Amino acid sequence: MQKLMGLVRRCVDDYNMIEAGDKIAVGVSGGKDSLVLLVLLAGLREYFNKPFELEAITIDMGLGMDYSGVETLCREIGVPYTIVKTEIAPIIFDHRQEKNPCSLCAKMRRGALNQAIKERGFNKLALGHHYDDAVETFVMSLLFEGRISCFQPVTNLDRTGIIQIRPMLYIHEKTVDNFARRRELPVIENRCPVDKETKREEVKQLIYQLSQTYPDLKERIFGAMQRYPLPEWEPHGRYKRPKEQE
């Protein structure tokens, strides 16, 4: 717990993610990434030198998922929790019957989440993207779009006035998995009909296969993103490559 909070603290400091008085909403899907982020930010809140407020918000897609375990976790760590009911899944899969639903789904979820945040007066949204997500997104942009690109550690959404932050960029997916398992976090099974059938899953498997031959592949890609640097990716602090935790 302390080691992972240290990595979150380093990432927050390197990219100036949190300022005193911030009202931060954590987008909680019920998956391991968002739950681990929630627990780590709740822990960081207790000793961080810049006081901030924290709340968890879930966009219920209409897939019949049970969030009672998340509600219990939020009570235990002292974080308010809001569930926003939507019909996003029925619209996409039943009414529109989208053949490539991921892009539209992401757009609708972002819209619902941003609206919920604005209504509650939050100025920042914390997302659970981790180290591997960044590497995969970079490779996806290169392979499928012919661009050298990735999401930014801190993103200013001009239309809404909301700032997105990604405090887990220094934590590997394997480390996230192990922490969620050891803490017995109430991870909810993803009921999306196209889960594990996306381009991201293809790239994840490609990177895994290449890493068997080139063990430092992910570290080299991530380091290149910071040294190049991609827009907004150059850290302000002295970044040290994190290691995967068993």
Image: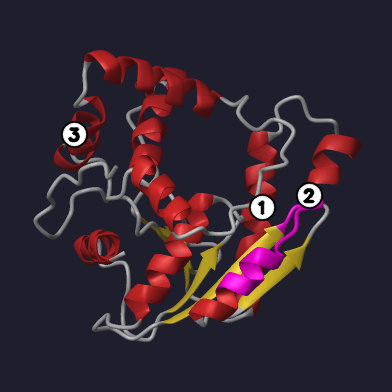
The crowd level at tag 1 (other Cα within 10 Å; few <14, some 14-19, many 20+) is: some
At a point 62% along the width and 66% down the height, the residue shown is 70
Q: How is the image coloured?
A: secondary structure
- Left or right of 115 on screen, residue 238: left
Q: Which residue is mark 2?
A: 88
Q: Which residue is mark 1?
A: 109
Q: Which is more toward the observer, 172 or 76?
A: 76
The crowd level at tag 3 (other Cα within 10 Å; few <14, some 14-19, many 20+) is: few
Residue 66 is a magenta residue: yes
**Spot occupied by residue 202 in the image (x, y as percentages of width and height):** 50, 20
Residue 163 visible (yes or no)? no
Q: Earlier in the sequence, mark 3 or mark 2?
A: 2
Q: Earlier in the sequence, mark 1 or mark 2?
A: 2
**Spot occupied by residue 208 in the image (x, y as percentages of width and height):** 37, 22
Residue 224 is labelled as 3
Numbered range of the magenta stretch: 60-73
> Do the residues under discs 3 and 2 have CB atoms within 8 angstroms?
no
Q: Quadrant of the N terminus?
A: bottom left
Residue 194, placed above or below residue 88: above
Q: CA distance from mark 3 to mark 2?
A: 37 Å
Q: Earlier in the sequence, mark 3 or mark 1?
A: 1
Q: Amino acid at mark 2?
A: Ile
Q: Secondary structure at mark 3?
A: helix
> Do the residues under discs 1 and 2 have CB atoms within 8 angstroms?
yes
Q: CA distance from mark 1 to mark 2?
A: 8 Å
Residue 178 is labelled as none
